[in-house]
Image: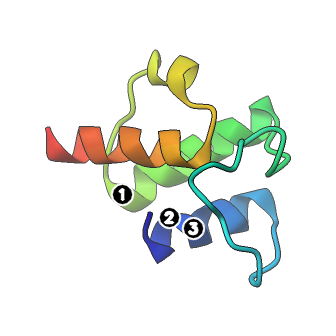
Amino acid sequence: MDARFSDLIKSVAELPDSFTVLPEHDLKADLDIDSLRLIDVLLAVEDEFGVELEEDALARIETAGDLYVEIEKVAAA
């Protein structure tokens, strides 16, 4: 995961700058991102990375690492 991704997650989740987002962090349990905030995260990710995630990707995304992998898949296509 790169710093741009980590900074985006911290910003949307309102986490302190000193927090380190790890791939294994669960978006809901560890980062306190509820379903409404998850939509904000996805929109911010799509805007920042210039990608469009598929709706069914939401079902596969549980951790920060899962989300980053989805971004990489779409960006590589």
Query: How many marks overall?
Result: 3
Which numbered disc flags the more N-terminal residue, 1 or 3? 3
Q: Which scheme is used to colour this image of the protein?
A: rainbow
Q: Are marks 1 and 2 in contact (CB under 8 Å)?
A: yes
- Image point (50%, 39%), residue name: 66
Q: Quadrant of the N terminus?
A: bottom left
- Which of the 4 quarters of the picture holds residue 13? bottom right
Mark 1 or 2, closer to the camera: 2
Calculate the distance from the C-alpha at mark 1 to the C-alpha at mark 2. 9 Å
Which SS class for mark 2? helix
Q: Quadrant of the C terminus?
A: top left
Going by the numbered disc 1, the residue's amino acid type is Phe
- Image point (43%, 70%), residue name: 2
- Image point (70%, 67%), residue name: 10
Which SS class for mark 3? helix
Going by the numbered disc 2, the residue's amino acid type is Phe
Residue denoted by label 2: 5
Q: Is residue 45 left or right of residue 13?
A: left
Q: Is residue 77 left or right of residue 51?
A: left
Residue 17 x, y percent position in the rendering: 75, 82
The disc placed on residue 49 is: 1
Classify 7 as above or below 13: below
Residue 4 x, y percent position in the rendering: 47, 72
The disc placed on residue 6 is: 3
Classify 17 as above or below 4: below
Calculate the distance from the C-alpha at mark 2 to the C-alpha at mark 3. 4 Å
Classify 66 as above or below 44: above
